Image (cartoon, rainbow, N blue to C red):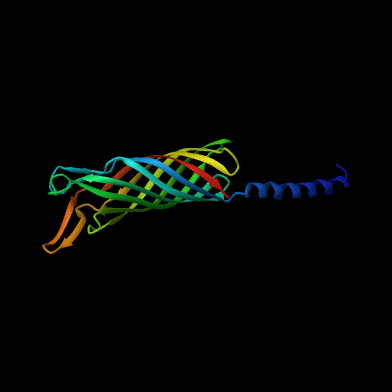
Amino acid sequence: MSLVRTPTVILACLLVVPTAAAQDQQFRFELTPYLGYRLGGTFDEQDGDRQFELEDSDAQGLMISGRVQPNTQWEILYGRQSTEVDTEGLFIDDPLLDVDVDYIHIGGTYLFEGGNVQPFIALTVGVTHVDPAPSDFSSESFFSFSVGGGWQLNATKRLGVRLEARAFVTNVDSDSNIFCRSGAGGGVCVIDVDSESLTQWEARAGLVFRF
């Protein structure tokens, strides 16, 4: 290679590298609203052999992701399920107690190489907030984590589809009372818990918007 051509080649490389990097960094964030279906979740009764199960139901939520490296993203997750707990034998009137189960998590996602179809795994930690109705019952918050995986379908540069299955594990304090309320006759709690964890599974699909 001649000395005349050498500076030309170096200059071309310096121009190409930043251009490729700029294209790679063009989309730094992803916004993914999703719909899903959540299953499972059981509280064990402390003074008996009964179990109180959360009914399977629809779930919805939102994920915000940001790129750390080409295949690694941080992730903020909010998910909500409006469901019921069968408390037959504890209430005189309605045996079904309405409950909202919210997950507020932060973590990360690793995307494997795959072109327009990328498998991924995800791990998050955060808080599970369980809020019963009517409003005079106290809500509860517990530490939790989640593990998930699925596929991200990249339809265009700005739009994709995320298909995922995820397990949520909540650390429930054993030998504790939940869903309590106070009244003229003193305090009362719906369930005396003898559990160490509450596990739920969720299948979901969401639209991925990149910006």
- In this view, 38 is above or below 144: above
On the image, which quarter does residue 115 sit in?
top right
Residue lying at 27% horizontally and 47% vertically, measured from the top left: 197
Residue lying at 27% horizontally and 41% vertically, measured from the top left: 55
Q: Nearer the viewer, residue 29 or 131?
A: 131
Which residue in the rendered view is the most extreme toward the front? 93
Q: Quadrant of the N terminus?
A: top right
On the image, which quarter does residue 205 sit in?
top left
Query: How many numbered badges does the structure rendering display?
Result: 0
Residue lying at 42% horizontally and 49% vertically, measured from the top left: 124
Residue 37: horizontal and vertical position, in percent?
Answer: 36, 40
Residue 151: horizontal and vertical position, in percent?
Answer: 49, 37
Q: Nearer the viewer, residue 176 or 135?
A: 135
Residue 138: horizontal and vertical position, in percent?
Answer: 24, 58
In the rendered structure, the answer to whether residue 49 lies left or right of residue 68 reads left
Residue lying at 43% horizontally and 50% vertically, measured from the top left: 77
